Image (tube, rainbow, N blue to C red):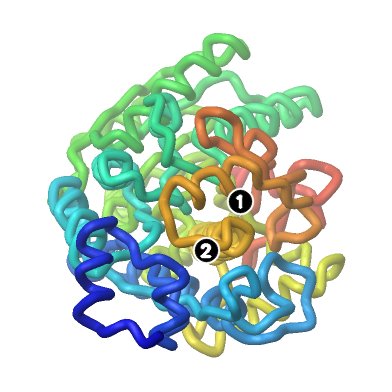
Amino acid sequence: MIISRRAALIGAATTGVLPVSKLLAQGTQEVVIGAIYPMSGSNAQVGVDARHALETAAEIINTANAIDLPTAKAAGLPGLGGAKVRLVFADHQADPQKGRAEAERLITQDKVCSIVGAFHSSVSNTVSVACERYAVPYMCADSSSPSLHRRNLKFFFRPAAHDETFSKGMFDFLDAQRAAGKKIETLALFYEDTIFGTDSSNTQRKLAQERGYKVTADIKYRANSPSLTAEVQQLKTANADVLLPSSYTTDAILLVKTMGELGYKPKNIVAQAAGFSEKAVFDAVGDKLDGLISRASFSLDMAAKRPSISYVNDKFKARAGRDLNDNTSRQFMALLILADAINRAKSLEGEKIRAALAATNIPGSETIMPWAKVHFGPDGQNPDADPVLIQYLGGKWVTVAPKDVAVAVAKWPMNP
């Protein structure tokens, strides 16, 4: 029996999704997934790179590849008769309310079965609530605020680490340096005023107290501020042993430029990634950042042990003209993990995809990440997303911690 397009659309409007039987009967064989990122404004490059990462993932899902990654070996999703993934992108412009509206549009008009996003934690906050209301899974690819998985949402899933896990890794590294005889007594916290910065600073403040470090500067600034002169002057006066910045791209560039103008050279910088993982920052001010350390979800160095990393990086680089980084690696894996769940669910219904995500159990060796495993607790968080620390040396990143994956000894201090 051939189902008319009008009848199919009526069914989709009624249920919010297109049943697989109708999907296959029409011959469309598509799995439509929404992606919400900043495609314009000061963080537009993040959105451009996210598109490249997600399109690389979709290419691997939709074609047969001889690599050991979820959904990579078959062309399309076998659980849905070989259906292909199609991405629909939306621009949230770094505005949480715009993100919420775009999520609702993707769900009600584009009939997406799931949404991936959104870089900014403040946007993931509103988008995930909209997804919850429509019973559509939200795959939080790269937003790291720890408060996001503590809201009792059923349809929220995050395979990557959050800032409490990242910060613990950063402080473990500081402890190890101190144990090796390096002078680390004082810290300076520098963070933007959205949920990302405030959650990051709260975690770092708590860890500093627990680990016996003195916070000599605790500076919150307005995101996308036109000037950071007063704030950098405070940092210079404090002259802490380690500066811990939590800043997005444009703020990171302005911070480093202002430090140069005021003659402030931090002894060490250990960054909460974000802008300090973006190529745009190092293109603009990389000459001033040799020795900077950042927490990360991804280590390109691991390619020597895991061939899938080079395979994926080559495909991504052909699109983007740059290597995978902390953000794009998480975006890539998020779509593969979501596609794996949709394939196991054998359905486009939100509840069935949610149940399949909750049952996820992927060994870390079947990812491009240094994670021990991918599985989700009742809160939707993967508790085994192990972070690494990477250092910018001689124009490239090298892994310096933890010891079992490090390929170099950290340069410390960065500015003697």
Q: Residues within 10 Å of mark 2 (few under 14, many from 20)?
A: many
- The residue lying toward the viewer, choosing from 289 and 8, is 8
Residue 206 in picture, x, y percent from top left: 49, 14
Rendered residue at 33%/57% (across/down)? 249
Rendered residue at 22%/35% (across/down)? 221
Residue sticking out furthest to the front: 1
Task: State whether residue 387 appears in this view.
Answer: no
Q: Secondary structure at mark 1?
A: loop
Task: State whether residue 75 appears in this view.
Answer: yes
- The residue lying toward the viewer, choosing from 181 and 194, is 194
Amino acid type for the residue under numbered disc 1: Ser
Q: In the figure, residue 64 lies in which quadrant?
A: bottom right
Q: Which residue is mark 1?
A: 297
On the picture, is 225 further left or further right than 376? left
- The residue lying toward the viewer, choosing from 18 and 335, is 18
Q: Secondary structure at mark 2?
A: helix
Amino acid type for the residue under numbered disc 2: Leu
Rendered residue at 28%/75% (across/down)? 8
Residue 263 in picture, x, y percent from top left: 35, 47
In this rendering, the answer to whether 115 lies above or below 153 is below
Q: Residues within 10 Å of mark 1 (few under 14, many from 20)?
A: many
- Pointer 1 or 2: first along the chain: 1
Residue 160 in picture, x, y percent from top left: 57, 46
Q: Rounded to the nearest whole Å, what is the CA distance between mark 1 and mark 2?
A: 16 Å
- The residue lying toward the viewer, choosing from 78 and 157, is 78
Q: Can you tell which mark lies on residue 218?
A: none
In this rendering, the answer to whether 175 lies above or below 97 is above
**From the viewer's perspective, is the residue at label 1 or at label 2 nearer?**
2
Q: Can you tell which mark lies on residue 335?
A: 2
Rendered residue at 26%/30% (across/down)? 220
Quadrant (top left, top right, bottom left, bottom right) of the C terminus: top right
